[in-house]
């Protein structure tokens, strides 16, 4: 399902009009109409507000996944990665911090930090 269909479906299931939603989110009703009619994606911050309003993840809202919430996905995700080495994990998945992808150099620094931390913990420092 694409964004415009999912957006409209969520609004209708919530039992609210475009006008009511516009008031709730403090956005123009015409923006809501455009989302439903044209499928125009809102800016990132607004997407997050809308997803929170409906209690779903942004990925669900824009049609990337059929899993409504991140929590639902996370219940299945750890079992898939339990036995993966960290190096394999960072090669397979994009890791972001504060919305920016972690670079290879940053990952090396993170690994070095953890290794140093473990050594210090063993020595009770």
Image (cartoon, rainbow, N blue to C red):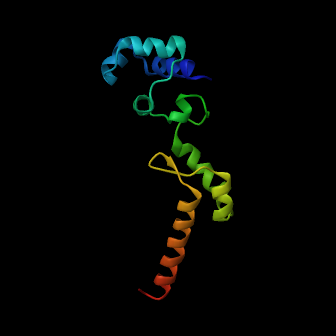
Residue at 56% in and 55% down: 103
Residue 27 horizontal/vertical position (percent): 34, 19
Say if 15 sits above or below 91 in the image. above
What is the quadrant of the C terminus in the image?
bottom left
Residue 106 horizontal/vertical position (percent): 53, 61
Q: Is residue 32 left or right of residue 85?
A: left
Residue 36 horizontal/vertical position (percent): 50, 14
Q: Is residue 73 left or right of residue 83?
A: left
In the image, farthest residue toward the front: 105
Observer able to see residue 17: no
Say if 2 sits above or below 124 in the image. above
Residue 55 horizontal/vertical position (percent): 44, 34
Residue at 63% in and 64% down: 86
Residue at 56% in and 61% down: 105
Observer able to see residue 122: yes
Between 89 and 102, the one lying in front of the other is 102
Say if 39 sits above or below 87 in the image. above
What is the quadrant of the N terminus in the image?
top right
Residue at 34% in and 24% down: 25
Q: Total number of numbered labels?
A: 0
Say if 87 sits above or below 43 in the image. below
Figure quadrant of residue 28: top left
């Amino acid at each position: 399902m694409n964004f415009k269909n999912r957006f409209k479906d969520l609004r209708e299931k919530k039992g609210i009009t475009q006008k009511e939603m516009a008031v709730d989110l403090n956005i123009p009703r015409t923006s809501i109409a455009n989302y439903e009619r044209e499928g125009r994606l809102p800016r990132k911050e607004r997407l997050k507000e809308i997803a929170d309003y409906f209690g779903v993840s942004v990925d669900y809202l824009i049609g990337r996944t059929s899993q409504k919430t991140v929590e639902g996905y996370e219940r299945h995700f750890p079992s898939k990665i339990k036995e993966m080495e960290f190096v394999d994990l960072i090669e397979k998945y994009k890791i972001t911090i504060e919305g920016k992808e972690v670079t290879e150099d940053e990952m090396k620094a993170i690994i070095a930090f953890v290794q140093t931390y473990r050594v210090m913990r063993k020595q009770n420092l």
